[in-house]
Amino acid sequence: MDIIKVKKAGPWLWIPTLYFAEGLPYFIVNTIALAVFKDMGLDNGTLGLVTTIISLPWLIKPFWSPFVDIFRSKRWWILSMQVAMAVAVLLVALLLPVTSFTMILILFLVVAFASATHDIAADGFYMLALDPKNQSAFVGVRSTFYRIASVFGQGVLVVLAGVLQRRVGDVSKAWSIVLLVSALILAAITLYHFMIVPVPADDVDNREGKSAARIFREFGESFATFFTKKDVWIAILFMLLYRLPEALSVNMLYPFFKDPVSEGGLGLTTDAYGMVYGTFGVVALLAGGIIGGVYASRVGLKKALWPMALSLALPCAVYLYMAITQPSNLWIVGGCIVFDQFGYGFGFTAYMLYMMQFADGPLKTSHYAICTAFMWLSMKIPGLFSGYLQLSLGYVGFFILVMICCIPAFAGVFFARRRLS
């Protein structure tokens, strides 16, 4: 993939598209795939299980990140994974109306694995292609375009699917068109990157003298030292429990909004969901994150942790309120979502800062990667059972359980905060 040699392109020419390409496949797998399976009739129990399984590559990516670091160049990995993602999404688009659920699930897993690998390569390439000054200068740019991908993937594409479902009259064809549009966008970005992504001098194949056994040994050593850090089990408890209410509920939100009122849902159309949750909700999430970052930087993490924990967990009560009252007014639904997502964005900042502080030290890159693995584990274990719990409890009972989950989340905060400086 490094056959095409390009001149050293300015960061503005490739950073925006690189991080849009990092974000879009993530939301295809974690938002659009969930919506596709739900709209095609998958029950909530199986839906929670399946959507957890297809996101596992992000959980386990630290285990193959050393190979991406050593074998071939980061540019090679970026371009290879972008080709793989574009082809896999295209195959989903073409086969969705005619093939089995199992094949679609496998293809989404391919997208997930390629996307997780692309994340590793893109973040490594960013540090190789830019000097420290530019790394700091463009961190906001990369974050912004990842968030634009979030709005596009969770909002624009879902709204488009809803409009197409009404006009085409066929759910699978509507999602097929949306995925075809996504594949064409990914293909266009990939072609552009072949021509424009630079070839840094330090971006080389580092496999010389590195056997697979040595790579595993070095990774094992960094993994082992993680568990010798002070208060490691308190930190793990915090990382596993802090987002428990969200972890239990997140896979069931689309079904809740989509299921008919007679089944306890809100009966929203797909495009209405895309507008209120994928657009206004995401904007509120971003605003909460920005304000949370400013607040934490001013008062410090220890003082900010309780307010942020409360803002992340307690707004989940809006879903219990909506499950009880089943509002039909889109403004009320949208207001509840904006309130919840703003609180989540504000509160999640503390989680990221805590992981950064805990990972700090000689092996902070490896240790932070392990922290992110615990972050994903905290989300995916509850997600495995969320659908079955919802089916057995109904939406009101399920969201009561979500609120009860605030208690262990706050217990994790209590113990973690006592050990913060």
Image (tube, grey):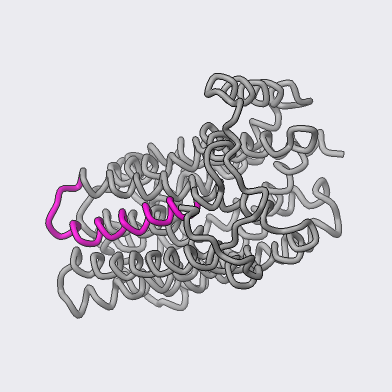
Q: Classify residue 286 as left or right of residue 100.
A: right
Q: Range of the magenta residues?
A: 78-101
**Magenta region's main secondary structure?**
helix
Which quarter shows the C terminus?
top right
Image position, residue 116 (x, y; %): 48, 46
Which residue is at a point 24% across and 56% down the rendered structure image?
Answer: 91
Image position, residue 43 (x, y; %): 24, 48
Q: Classify residue 235 as left or right of residue 386.
A: right
Image position, residue 390 (x, y; %): 35, 45
Image quarter of residue 322: bottom left
Q: Classify residue 103 as left or right of residue 330.
A: left
* Count of numbered circles in the view: 0
Observer-nearest of 267 and 184: 184
Image position, residue 339 (x, y; %): 57, 67
Residue 175 seen in the current view: yes
Magenta region includes residue 89: yes
Magenta region includes residue 278: no
Which residue is at a point 22% across and 73% down the rendered structure image?
Answer: 165
